[in-house]
Image (cartoon, rainbow, N blue to C red):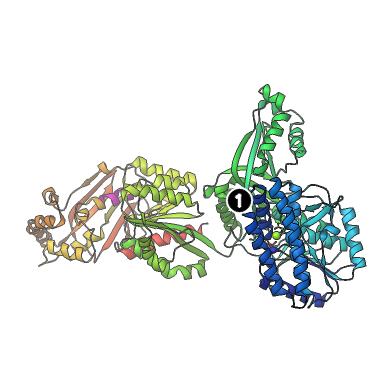
Amino acid sequence: MSYAKVLKFGGSSLATPERIKNSIEIVKQAHDSTQQMAVVVSAFGGVTDALILIARLASLGKNEYQKHFYELKSRHVAACKELILQKKAPYVLEELEKMFHELSSVIDGIFLVGECSEKTLDLVMSFGERFSAFIISEAAIPFIQDAVFLDARNIIKTDRHFGHAQVDFEKTNKNIQKWFQENPKMPVVTGFIASSNENETTTLGRGGSDYTASIIGAALGVYIIEIWTDVDGVMTADPRKEEYAFVIPEMSYREAMEMSHFGAKIIHPPTIAPAFEKKIPLLIKNSFHPSAEGTLISFTSSNNEALICGISSIDSLALLSLQGSGMVGVCGIAKRLFGALSEKEINVILISQGSSEHSICFAILPEFVENAKKAIQKEFALEMQAHLIDDVVIENDLSVIAVVGENMRKTTGISGKLFAALGNNGINVVAIAQGSSELNISFVVKKQDEVKAINVIHEAFFLSPKKTVHVFLAGTGLIGKALLQQIERFSEKIQNEQQLNIKIVGIANSLQMAFHPQGMNLKDWESSLKENHEHMNVRHFVDRMIGCNLPNSIFADCTSSEEITLQYGDILKANISIVTPNKKANSGSYDDYKKLRNTAQKKGVKFLYGANVGAGLPIISTIHEMLRSGDKIVKIEAILSGTLSFLFNSFTEGVVFSELLSKAQANGFTEPDPRDDLNGMDVARKLLILARESGYPLEMKDITVQKILPEKCFEAHSVPEFYENLKKFDEELNKKRIDAERDGKVLRYIATFEKNIGTVSLQAVRKEHPFYNLSGTDNIVAITSEFYKENPLVIKGQGAGAEVTSGKVFADIISLGQKI
Ligand code: ADP
Ligand code: ASP
Ligand code: MG
């Protein structure tokens, strides 16, 4: 006789009476179209954990266990009242009462002796499934008349390895077949639990109800085993760790085995084997969303264009290494090592041995570390005494991540892509192992890097649906604000057209800072910054940014602060790219300038500062392109200050310079202290950067700055005082203008670089000069090179303004996102 189908419902599908009703409805529909079937159920969601807690509290002599016990009881009684028809309720409640009475005696016993063995814990845990299967079988009867409660302890036999018992398939299969022959009914079977030959209660390991379903399905030779859970199927990664994980429609048994072995909780690892042996497909379905197709696990492997099937991880591990000169070329070391571990029943999750044979390292669960250490020390006591083998080295707080897929076998370059993605995000790989089946590459990382590693691998291997960059913004002045507005305005478009999600995860101004690793709502960043009472401290901001450890992190520095640029080295070292209009970092010493580039290169991150010169104009990028094409830059002539450009473009007859400056300041065209524009330093910095970008190792001292105004004029204690001083020079400046005009010229503040020397000076240029006709805040750069010898290459356009500057920063952020 063959039961056509097994359906298994996990705790998540049975967490509330409402969910249970829904699950019964799924069973009913299946039952209507399938003649014979079995249903396997877990304990109601959270019940096994609650039972473990009760047992633990009781064993510690803590009275609180009673409170938890009564909560558990009332939860089940309430479920009964809601699920069971009135006429049947007294019987069901009475049976339930008997079971709770039995449980209460066991727990009181634990409390009295102050101890709970593995064996007793199995007994305690078994009640979860016994309660749920009993209640569900009774609740199902009105819809499915032949529903009947079946305690799996009567059919599934195991060894006495409590907590993780091994199934005796010979006996179990016979029992299952016999039961179903004798009972032409639809059993609601307790998942997870079984019994030993001595009829002691055992369990199959946490999450083991999936296994029960597979054991029963295989024994009966059903045509499908359905696992009903709370997600749409097996996903490319744990959806709690990877926002963009998606369902894998089909995967092979081997892929499912590897995924589950390396931590994908959705299937209990041993579940696959019985189904695989009997060629029975497993279908993972969502009880919350039954119309979703789910994942079919069979002989057909995943057909992902992405080369890999999925990523899974075990989040808590320890890595042990054994090393020493006495291991080289000596046979049998591995055998002894793993023999000693197996004797202590310690499961080894990953092994890696260098070809020098000098060391072997392996990963195990943290709870086994002490036992493993002792076992190894005992096994190699003699070698350790003779200093041929060192003592075991233990590293804690690690995670193992496995990249799984049948396609990997046929494809080269997977490891390259994998480790490049990790490296570019600063994730250190502690150990690597690849099975010879090439079905999985697994590697160990620090626990704190686990989620980040999953995210970057997911992004690297799966084309869709989206990539995310995490932006930390410093500076909420004109440029920072404009940047936030642009991101807010265009984020939907960028998400749709470029599949790029730009999340602002940190914001700071000179007073406050705020962090939201999930991404801020850009509509009210101002209030979230205000409400957040964290005072801005540059070093703390940087530490927090590094501490967030988010993949594809970008620091957008929209300040002009030197205190911040001093942190750039550390930021790049932490694999965070920088985009900025802030010139300070690039105009310090040449040594520092070089160092930043080296760090960025070494770390595989970007330092983008296109907005350093000419706001949004493509000046720096053009120089880079010229150099890439083999050109050599010979001379640069430029007007590099939007402010000064504006001033001299507007300085015509009848205009008083000090009044013009005051107007410009009122319109926001100058720095808060206009001396910063007029002293020429800003222009000198920009020239220095252009010279350096052109390949010349210039220092600031190599640039001569001729100030527009005499030094005396700048010596003022305040801006108003400076204006007073300036008035005294209005006449002198006016005279310069008239002199120039007399010769048919106009005044321009020009930066020149040639033959390793830079100058910045006020010059009068004639009509034929390319700098004669400028308007507004125009910047202009004329580059003479070996290719552009006769006529220089000229770039001209609006060279100041918050929007064009932030636009460049925004474009740089997007370009980083596209490179992921
Ligand atoms: P049930 O209660 O049905 O047994 P589990 O909680 O044991 O359900 O397993 C389902 C959970 O497994 C999902 O809610 C999800 O959070 C987690 N999970 C981990 N890895 C994956 C993955 N690769 N695909 C889908 N779910 C996963
Ligand atoms: N109830 C058990 C557990 O929580 C078994 C299962 O749900 O599969 O581990
Ligand atoms: Mg489960």
Answer yes or no: disc 1 within 8 Å of ligand 1.
no
Q: Quadrant of ligand 2?
A: bottom right
Three-letter residue code for mark 1 = Leu
Label 1 CA crowd tier, 10 Å (few <14, some 14–19, many 20+)? some
- Relative to 602, residue 794 above or below: below
Q: Position of residue 124 (x, y in %)?
A: 73, 54
Tell me if 119 is positioned left or right of 627 in this view: right
Q: Position of residue 336 (x, y in %)?
A: 76, 33
Callout 1 secondary element: helix
Q: Position of residue 42 (x, y in %)?
A: 73, 62
Which span is picked out in magenta? 683-691
Residue 20 occupies quadrant: bottom right
Tell me if 656 is positioned left or right of 314 in this view: left
- Look at the image and tell me whether residue 616 can be seen: no
Residue at numbered disc 1: 418
Name the main secondary structure of what is drawn in magenta: helix
- Look at the image and tell me whether residue 564 can be seen: yes
Most foreground residue, 186 or 297: 186
Rendered residue at 51%/66% (across/down): 498
Most foreground residue, 709 or 266: 266
Q: Is residue 341 magenta?
A: no
Tell me if 522 is positioned left or right of 461 in this view: left
Q: Position of residue 334 (x, y in %)?
A: 74, 34
Rendered residue at 37%/61% (across/down): 529
Most foreground residue, 245 or 713: 245
Q: Residue furthest top?
A: 386
- Relative to 137, residue 251 above or below: above
